[in-house]
Image: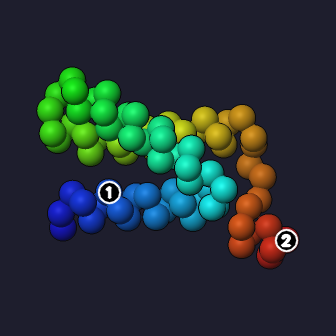
Amino acid sequence: MSWSFLWILGFFAIYLLLGTKLMAQLLLWAILGGIIVGLMIGQAGILLGTAAGALSFAALYRFQNGRQPSGRSAVLQ
């Protein structure tokens, strides 16, 4: 398994958790995280920083908004 496959898989998982409306903000956080960490520790840091930026956005969003159902889970309830 390559790093890029894991990176795409992680984004897909977060996409399913957060829904479509937040993808622009998620990508912005991920890109900023990738740039910041990449500048500090090099090319491998870009992937780590991107993942950290995306996960921090997801955690912050969930913390601010609670566990409100979105997407398919809202339809099921």
Identified at 81% across, 74% down, the residue is 75
Cβ–Cβ under 8 Å for marks 1 and 2: no
Type of residue at label 2?
A: Gln
In the image as oriented, which residue stretches furthest toward the bottom?
76
Work out whether residue 33 or residue 55 is closer to the camera in this orientation and state it: 33
Crowd tier of the residue under label 1, counting other residues whose Cα lies within 10 Å: few below 14, some 14–19, many 20 or above: some
Q: Is residue 20 visible?
A: yes
Question: In the visual, does 16 lie left or right of 53?
Answer: right
Name above or below for residue 58 compared with residue 41.
Answer: below
**Quadrant (top left, top right, bottom left, bottom right) of the C terminus:** bottom right
Secondary structure under the numbered disc 1 in the rendered image: helix
Identify the residue position indicated by label 2 in the image.
77
Residue 15 quadrant = bottom right
**Quadrant (top left, top right, bottom left, bottom right) of the N terminus:** bottom left
Type of residue at label 1?
A: Trp
Secondary structure under the numbered disc 2 in the rendered image: loop
Q: Position of residue 72 (x, y in %)?
A: 71, 72
Identified at 66% across, 42% down, the residue is 62
Q: Position of residue 8 (x, y in %)?
A: 35, 62
Identify the residue position indicated by label 1 in the image.
7
Crowd tier of the residue under label 2, counting other residues whose Cα lies within 10 Å: few below 14, some 14–19, many 20 or above: few
Name above or below for residue 32 compared with residue 3.
Answer: above
Identified at 26% across, 45% down, the residue is 47
Work out whether residue 39 or residue 64 is closer to the camera in this orientation and state it: 39
Identified at 48% across, 62% down, the residue is 13
What's the coloring here? rainbow
The numbered dot on residue 39 is: none
Name above or below for residue 77 compared with residue 22.
Answer: below
Q: Position of residue 12 (x, y in %)?
A: 46, 64
